[in-house]
Image (spheres, helix red, strand yellow):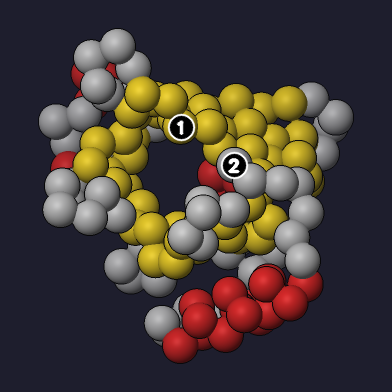
Amino acid sequence: WYEIAHLPNRFQKDCVGNTTATYTIGEKGDIEVLNQCLKKNGEMSDARGKAKIEDKKTNAKLEVRFAPRALSFIPGVWGDYWIIDLEPNYQYAVVGHPDRKYLWILSRSPEMIDATYQQILRRVEAKGYNPAKLM
């Protein structure tokens, strides 16, 4: 997935572009996460994590951790990543947090048609997010 926009957060403060999120199903059915971005200094940054499905009925609620496995027993290590908007053919997804402190608009292509983006902004605003804060 290519990141189109996100709410500011501490773990992306050094990212200036080319941000992607790759989700891979591992051999044992676990979900591996690789987030990458271009940093201000021109280097690429990698963050590797694990995800688990919390809502087996819809598969729309994930818990993700980027901390070492040894710390996975600590509840605060896992972050809620809820899929709050999804294009039927998986051309875009919007991932949010129940407290509305995180939001990512993701696309299968590096660019998104502005009309689609504007429609997404209206829907996330209706869900309590402030689209004016998106980067």
In this figure, which residue is indicated by the disc labeled 2?
A: 1
Tell me how many marks there are: 2
Residue type marked 2? Trp
Residue type marked 1? Tyr
In the drawing, does residue 80 fall left or right of residue 75?
right
Q: Position of residue 46 (x, y in %)?
A: 60, 25
For the N terminus, which image quadrant? Answer: top right
Helix, strand or loop under label 1: strand
Tell me if I can see residue 81 in this picture: yes
Tell me if I can see residue 13 in this picture: no
Q: Is residue 88 above or below residue 129?
A: above
Q: Position of residue 59 (x, y in %)?
A: 26, 49
Q: Write down the quadrant of residue 2 in the picture.
A: top right
What's the mark number on residue 40? none
Decide which of 14, 20 is in the foreground and name it: 20
In this figure, which residue is indicated by the disc labeled 1?
A: 23
Point out the residue furthest to the top here: 27
Label 2 neighbourhood size at 10 Å, few (<14), some (14-19), many (20+)? some
Q: Write down the quadrant of residue 130 in the picture.
A: bottom right
Which residue is rendered at x = 54% and y = 44% of the image? 11
Which residue is rendered at x = 66% and y = 60% of the image? 5
Q: Is residue 30 above or below residue 87?
A: above
Q: Write down the quadrant of residue 84 in the picture.
A: bottom left
In the drawing, does residue 57 fall left or right of residue 49?
left
Q: Mark 2–mark 1 contact, CB under 8 Å? A: yes
Which residue is rendered at x = 44% and y = 66% of the image? 85
Decide which of 62, 76 is in the foreground and name it: 62
